[in-house]
Image (cartoon, rainbow, N blue to C red):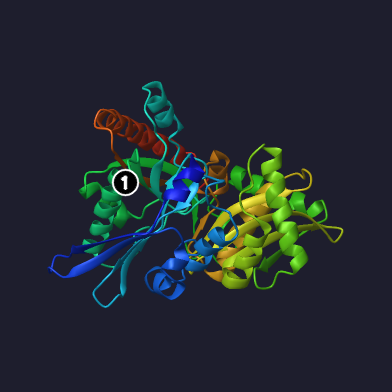
Amino acid sequence: MPNAIWTNLSQTKTVVANQQKQPLEISFHRAIDEIGAQDWNSLAGTADPFMRYEFLAALEENNCVGPDYGWLPYHIAVRDTDQQLVAACPIYIKTNSYGEFVFDWNWASAYEQAKLQYYPKMVCSVPYNPATGMRILSQDPALKTLVIQQTIAIAKKMQMSGMHWLFTTTEDTTLCEQQGLMLRMGCQYHWFNHDYESFDDFTAGFVSRKRKKVNRERRMVAEQGIEIKVIHGNEASAEQIIRAHEFYVSTFDRKSGVPTLQLEFFQQICRTMGQQVVFFFAYSQQQAIACAICLRSDDTLYGRFWGCDEQYHSLHFETCFYQGIDYCIEHQLQRFEPGAQGEHKIARGFVPTKTWSAHWIENEQFRPVLENFCQREQHGMQHQVDELTAMLPFREAS
């Protein structure tokens, strides 16, 4: 089915009028290079690493997305009468729910039990990435609303089961809600920089027992003779990039997963995104034994992947959490998002933080059922966030 959809997928264009009655050209594209790097980045900028043309193009050019993995690019572009790009959005037709991090397997199962097809569906998302960011590229709320409306229209026309916006900003979430979409709340664990001067300055706000535990974990890594080196993408040698990819693959092999990101993808983003790619390599006796792979914006560090040759006490915490905090403090980044899930992050100072997604469902019988589910889930998630926040290691303010 994915290959059949891909074969029949074509670029489509239509013309609509904006609020000033001026014509706008709406087009959908099978590849981001049909839109172009300069035009795309004129809206996306280069601060958010995942929404950059260079990142999304690297996924497509190195076969990390496509029919084999159930991510079929179908990006929307909006141009004015001068053919200037005024809005855009990364859209994918999905034939599974892999790599989304907003889990709807139960929705798909319910459709199957009702003898209905949940796939294909459409998503606005960055593949394999749970980081919140601007999804609808425009500074004009009216144009953003138009994009929402037009993507739903094409989803209806193509008989998709739904259209889903994943890890949306507050602005995009609000606009989706105003268009009648149902919202889902999630929870991640983020670190926030309160002008810390050092790691010790950060943990000084912990209760004594929690601070001692963190210090002990860091000390145990050092006592095992392990050295951590921070290497940016443009500084990494060919061998280091290969090793980083091997560590990435090893984690998926150990968990029986599918490592969709090819070595060539990592090589390409190291060339094109340079300092925005950050490797935290762990060395023992001058041999790389583990690596955490991160990306960064102007104000945020994003933890994405991790792998190791064998288990070392507390090395995961040091490489994936503590080194990232050190990096943020040194480079004056305001936020560290170490990836989805993981309540163990709370004891290490990562704050339970709400995430959002927005959903349009085509089936009118299922729509109220899923709306009710989202409302109940949101109530439960809010209760969970409150409980988890109470578990943070910080001393209460006097």
The extreme right residue here reads: 285
Q: Nearer the viewer, residue 248 or 314?
A: 248
Q: In this orientation, which residue lies closer to the viewer: 77 or 287?
A: 77
Query: From this viewpoint, which residue is outermost toward the top?
Result: 113
How packed is label 1: few (under 14 Cα within 10 Å), some, or many (20 or more)? many
> Can residue 162 be seen from the camera position used here?
yes
What element does badge 1 sit on? helix
Query: Is 235 located above or below residue 283 in the figure?
Result: below
Q: Where is mark 1, residue-wise?
A: 155
- Report whether residue 395 is seen: no
Question: How far across and how far down the image is residue 306, in percent?
Answer: 66, 50
Residue 256 as seen in the image, left or right of residue 65: right
Q: Quadrant of residue 319?
A: bottom right
Q: Residue at x 62, y 64 (%)?
A: 278
Q: Is 40 situated left or right of 275 in this image?
A: left
Tell me which residue sits at (64%, 68%) in the image: 233
Spot occupied by residue 223 in the image (x, y as percentages of width and height): 81, 52
Q: Residue 96 location, x and y as percent? A: 48, 39
Residue 119 image offset from top left, x and y in percent:
42, 37
Res. 301 image quadrant: bottom right
Total number of numbered discs in the rendering: 1
* Residue under the point 68% across and 65% down: 230
Indicate left or right for 146 with 95 as reference. Answer: left
Kindly identify the amino acid type of the residue bearing the numbered disc 1.
Answer: Ala
Q: Nearer the viewer, residue 316 or 19?
A: 19
The residue at 26%/78% (across/down) is 82
